[in-house]
Image: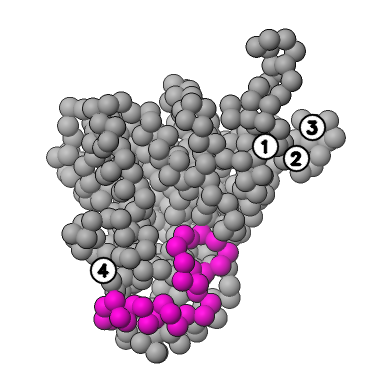
């Protein structure tokens, strides 16, 4: 396993005499108890602020890296550029963001794309006609649609299975299977998938494992250290955290895989703008403190919802009632702001609850500083076939919340008042 780049960054900043022991890519000296979870990665915030930020790389010695908007670059002679030649093929602002992302995930290479789905499209683009994918049955609706409809038209087939049971993967493997795609926690049922067990199993069968880490970010979960080959992100969500950028990324360690993903980035042209890259680089500097607040507030609200008579079930991996709570503690440092719960009743009750929220905004997406609420069955997961939604439990009474950074007491009051009207 490669040494964590977060640890490397800390050692560089603190000096060569740093001899702190590392376990699973995390500094473990003087680690405080984290309620049974893995410790938060020390040095994470330091890496987010300092990686690729050296003022010496810019002529003006700018402390904040500039936004380079140029689409083309002067060459010394034909086909002899200094470093960059064309904006789609490379950009200094984008390159900085990619270095930061790789460091935070404990990986070697980050590659940015124009959206989260663009990142998944790039992974699909690395496959060949006739290949087979095993995908989790409970994933983002756009992911389901991409594999189920678009990839199929290019001769790539997909089996959707419950990845919480390893036997389901064993039964789904075909001679042409090349990739296992998973989310953990899943969206929106928040099931927990054992990354290490699946990665160990996949390696025995020469399968790539890709983990969508959007819901937790590398601050709370680091799939590469658990054996995954690819980590994917919708940077639109927690990584940016301000609901003003659409972008995606993948992080890898393997050199051949990196070359392929980099080629696809350029060949498909699914690149983000320099300004958006600047925005995400800025946002990553506060990711650690934001995720701590999201985590604490969502657990407080989840515990409150468990006591409410108009709520039949609450799904939050940090609750002891979650069926994979112990596994979750073994592979993460905690949960984000995501909560799913079933309201007593059906579509009518769900609509009434959602329309009476005042602080929670009824909107798709998640991971911003503002709290959002939605009804997956008719919003984010409407493209999932109805029979599949019903099988998964994505009913008209399932509400998904993205708990933001407001005072949690105000959020509890908002939910309580909306439930009172139902």
Q: Say if 242 sits above or below 308 in the image.
A: above
Nearer-N-terminus badge (2/4): 2
Would you say 278 lies left or right of 342 here?
right
Q: CA distance from mark 3 to mark 2?
A: 8 Å
Q: Which residue is mark 3?
A: 58
Q: Which residue is mark 4?
A: 395
Mark 3 against mark 1, which lies toward the viewer?
Answer: 1
Residue at horizontal 74%, vertical 20%?
74
- Residue 336 makes an appearance in the image: no
Residue at horizontal 33%, vertical 59%?
381
Residue, far top? 77
| Residue 409 % position (x, y) | 54, 80
Q: CA distance from mark 2 to mark 4?
A: 47 Å
Q: Which residue is mark 1?
A: 93
Q: Nearer the viewer, residue 2 or 53?
A: 53
Q: Nearer the viewer, residue 46 or 174?
A: 174
| Residue 335 placement: quadrant | bottom left
Q: Which residue is mark 2?
A: 66
The quadrant the C terminus occupies is bottom left
Nearer-N-terminus badge (4/3): 3
Q: Assess disc 1: are there few (<14), some (14-19) or many (≥20) residues with their C-alpha within 10 Å of its C-alpha.
A: many
Which residues fall within the magenta stretch? 344-372
Give SS at disc 2.
Answer: loop
Queried whether the magenta region covers residue 49, the answer comes back as no
Q: Are marks 2 and 1 in contact (CB under 8 Å)?
A: yes
| Residue 380 placement: quadrant | bottom left
Q: Nearer the viewer, residue 115 or 231?
A: 115
């Amino acid at each position: 396993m490669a040494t964590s780049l977060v640890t490397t960054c800390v050692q560089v900043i603190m000096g060569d005499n740093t001899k702190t022991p590392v376990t699973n890519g995390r500094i473990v000296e003087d680690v405080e108890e984290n309620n049974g979870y893995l410790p938060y990665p020390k040095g994470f915030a330091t890496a987010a602020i300092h990686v690729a930020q050296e003022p010496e790389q810019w002529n003006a010695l700018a402390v904040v890296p500039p936004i380079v908007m140029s689409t083309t670059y002067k060459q010394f002679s034909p086909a002899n550029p200094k470093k960059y030649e064309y904006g789609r093929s490379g950009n200094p602002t984008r390159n900085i963001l990619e270095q930061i992302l790789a460091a935070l995930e404990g990986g070697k290479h980050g590659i940015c794309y124009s959206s989260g789905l663009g990142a998944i499209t790039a992974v699909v683009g690395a496959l060949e006609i006739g290949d087979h994918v095993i995908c989790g049955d409970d994933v983002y609706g756009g992911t389901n649609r991409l594999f189920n409809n678009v990839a199929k038209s290019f001769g790539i087939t997909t089996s959707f299975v419950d990845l919480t049971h390893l036997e389901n993967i064993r039964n789904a493997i075909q001679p042409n299977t090349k990739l296992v795609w998973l989310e953990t926690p899943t969206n929106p049922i928040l099931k927990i998938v054992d990354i290490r067990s699946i990665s160990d199993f996949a390696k025995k069968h020469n399968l790539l494992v890709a983990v969508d880490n959007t819901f937790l970010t590398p601050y709370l979960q680091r799939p590469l250290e658990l054996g995954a080959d690819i980590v994917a992100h919708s940077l639109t969500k927690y990584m940016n955290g301000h609901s003003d950028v659409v972008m995606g990324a993948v992080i890898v360690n393997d050199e051949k895989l990196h070359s392929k993903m980099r080629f696809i980035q350029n060949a498909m042209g699914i690149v983000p703008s320099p300004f958006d890259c600047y925005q995400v680089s800025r946002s990553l500097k506060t990711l650690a403190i934001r995720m701590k607040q999201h985590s604490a507030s969502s657990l407080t609200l989840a515990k409150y919802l468990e006591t409410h008579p108009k709520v039949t079930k609450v799904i939050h991996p940090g609750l002891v009632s979650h069926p994979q709570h112990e596994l979750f503690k073994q592979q993460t440092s905690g949960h984000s702001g995501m909560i799913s719960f079933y309201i007593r009743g059906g579509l009518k009750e769900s609509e009434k609850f959602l329309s009476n929220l005042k602080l929670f905004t009824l909107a798709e997406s998640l991971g911003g500083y503002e709290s959002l609420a939605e009804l997956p069955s008719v919003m984010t997961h409407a493209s999932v076939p109805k029979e599949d939604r019903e099988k998964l439990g994505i009913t008209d009474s399932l509400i998904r919340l993205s708990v933001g950074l407001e005072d949690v007491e105000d959020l509890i009051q908002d939910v309580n008042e909306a439930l009172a009207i139902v």
